Image: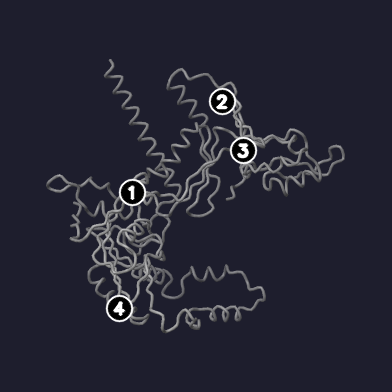
Amino acid sequence: TPSRIPPPKSKEVQLTNQQTSTTTMAPIPEHDLSTTGGTYDVNEAGIEFRHAPPLPTPKDGTEFLSRLENNLSLKVLDRPSKNELVFELVGVDISFANALRRIMIAEVPTMALEFVYMWNNSGLIHDEVLSHRLGLIPLNVDPRLFDEYGFDVDEDGNPAATDRNTIVFRLNVTCGRNAADDEKIRKKMEVKWKGEGLVSGYDVAEAQKKKEEKKSGGGRSNKDEEMEENLEPSIMNLSIADRAAADAVSSSNVQPTPIDSPHRPFTKHIYTRDFLWSPQGDQLSRFPLHSAGVGSGVGGGIRPLHEDILVAKLRPGQVIELEAHARKGVGKDHAKFSPVATASYRLMPHIEILKPIYDELAEELVNWFEPGVFKCEPTDEDGHRVKAVVSNPYACTMSRNFMRNPILKESIKMSRVPNHFIFCVESVGMMEPAVIVAEALKVLKAKCERVSGLADDALAMGE
């Protein structure tokens, strides 16, 4: 049974709806105009669509689905980083591709801070501005493990906040007179927080450290030894000198600068590591501190995705004390819920060499005009040394620089394939990009089923 979360008795600030790669080599696909209805020809001025006789209209839905199944393909091209994914989608209309892109941006649900209960804020940042900044902090939690707000109701039938639909964070920071006094205040408050069962970024780091020590037998972790083995040797092969240089620039050896003069007031920087997660119900058992985590974050309980995001700055005596509730939402309601930093696509380039390109002109094309798209191959045609051939059309950026050369302009034909899309998805981090694509397809499927059901109901009413 979900545990009810009582709302704090304080001033409430609700966030408003304000909007705040190189790919891997792949086989060059064949371009069939009959399946696309035409092609986009590229010229100096831009692109023009050239129509071609399309396939006959399907007789019924079965033929349409059969044709779609035979032409549709999805292939991963590259994974530049954990939060980036490049894939190609072939055999669909542009409306399908754009719907998938828009769903990834605006309709895949995530968790974000929605309500902020401000108890005390004597800093320079106003309550509303601070609340908006908090809402944009990405959370390292899988939204699929939580329910929509409104799924659970109270005795009167009103939506109730429970441990299945709400995540509670607290922030309670006070700026001391100086760095030493501030650290003393933090440690004193830390004892109080642990007694209340609150979890800070320092606690997660400590739990992760103990896990690593236990795995490595209490000594140095295997990860550290592996990293040390993989380090490139020093240019001068002076490891002792390298360590000395690293020690010289460490924070403990840096001399005070004029900006750190004794007459300058101490400034406390508030980071997301200062957020206190308040586990509700069985959340601590479902999201233990030593867990590997979900999405692309460091894991460990429910925490902000990055612990070093600057939230605010305080001067001696200033205080921020608040409670924030995270709920499930979608990007079309507020940009903070969007799981992607960007999701875009481009049409697949199609390049044809109409006239052979040899020797110096071929080398100029390969190295200067379109790097990575063409390559030179040895040839003995008519006494020439090398010949330019298309090697990787995926790398083409449609710069059209080759059109500056009148000979190359007549020798190369460039176009775009209307039903071949190259997607680039960059996740914010709470979910991996492949998961976002899969969730977007589920949303699109549900939309199609809903429309199909409405159509069936309309036909039934007409009969």
Asked if 8 appears above or below 461 in the picture, the reply is: below
Secondary element at image label 3: strand
**Mark closer to the observer (1, 3):** 1
User: Which residue type carries mark 3?
Assistant: Pro
Q: Dots 4 and 3: beta carbons under 8 Å? A: no
Secondary element at image label 2: loop
Residue 349: horizontal and vertical position, in percent? 61, 38
User: Which residue type carries mark 4?
Assistant: Ile
- For marks 1 and 2 on the same chain, the one whose residue lies earlier in the sequence: 1
Which residue does the numbered mark 4 point to in the structure image? Answer: 185
Q: Is residue 177 left or right of residue 262?
A: left
Which residue occupies the foreground of this view, 225 or 117?
117
Asked if 214 appears above or below 382 in the picture, the reply is: below
User: Which residue type carries mark 1?
Assistant: Asn
Q: Residues within 10 Å of mark 3 (few under 14, many from 20)?
A: many
Residue 101: horizontal and vertical position, in percent? 45, 41
**Mark closer to the observer (1, 4):** 1
User: Which residue type carries mark 2?
Assistant: Gly
Which numbered dot is residue 17? Answer: 1
Which residue does the numbered mark 3 point to in the structure image? Answer: 349
- For marks 1 and 4 on the same chain, the one whose residue lies earlier in the sequence: 1
- For marks 4 and 3 on the same chain, the one whose residue lies earlier in the sequence: 4
